Image (cartoon, rainbow, N blue to C red):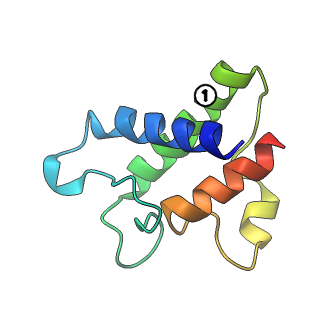
Amino acid sequence: MHNLAKQIIDDAIDEINIDQDAAVQIGKSLDTPLLSPSSNVDSLALVRLLLEVERLVEEKTGKAVVVVDESAFEAAQSPFATVGTLLRHVESLLT
């Protein structure tokens, strides 16, 4: 599942980056901040990224998932803090 989840996230980032200025492109490394004070990702880009991840999961697996739900907000560490935490969250949704 790791490879599929990583491919989905990478594809979603590529899709969002099409409309982003070069200075605010979202990186694909696992430690790229998404939802943190050091992030260059604005709230609209983050929402678009999460929706794109949901769309791609359904497209590639046939499984409808909700990336943002109560459990995501109740987690000790935000699943949206970095690309790596988002990857782990998507992996958990795919299993």
Using the image, determine if residue 48 lies above or below residue 41. Answer: above
Disc 1 marks a residue whose amino acid type is Arg
Q: Which quadrant holds the C terminus? A: top right
| Residue under the point 76% across and 20% down | 62
Q: How many marks?
A: 1
Residue 46: x percent and y percent?
Answer: 46, 52
Residue found 74% across the figure and 62% down from its top: 72
Residue 83 position, x and y percent, is 50, 59
Q: Nearer the viewer, residue 80 or 90?
A: 90
Q: Please give left or right for residue 53 compared with residue 44 in the image.
A: right
Would you say 63 lies left or right of 78 here? right
* Picture coordinates of residue 35, whole percent (x, y): 48, 68
**Image location (x, y in percent) of residue 56:** 59, 28
Quadrant of the image occupied by residue 14:
top left
Residue for badge 1: 55
Quadrant placement of the N terminus: top right
Residue 15 lies left or right of residue 78; in this view the side is left
Q: Is residue 18 above or below residue 80?
A: above
Give SS at disc 1: helix
Q: Residue at x 50, y 47 (%)?
A: 47
14 relative position to 85: left or right: left
In the rendered image, the vertical position of residue 77 relative to residue 94, given as above or below: below
For disc 1, the neighbor class at 10 Å (few under 14, some 14 to 19, many from 20) is some
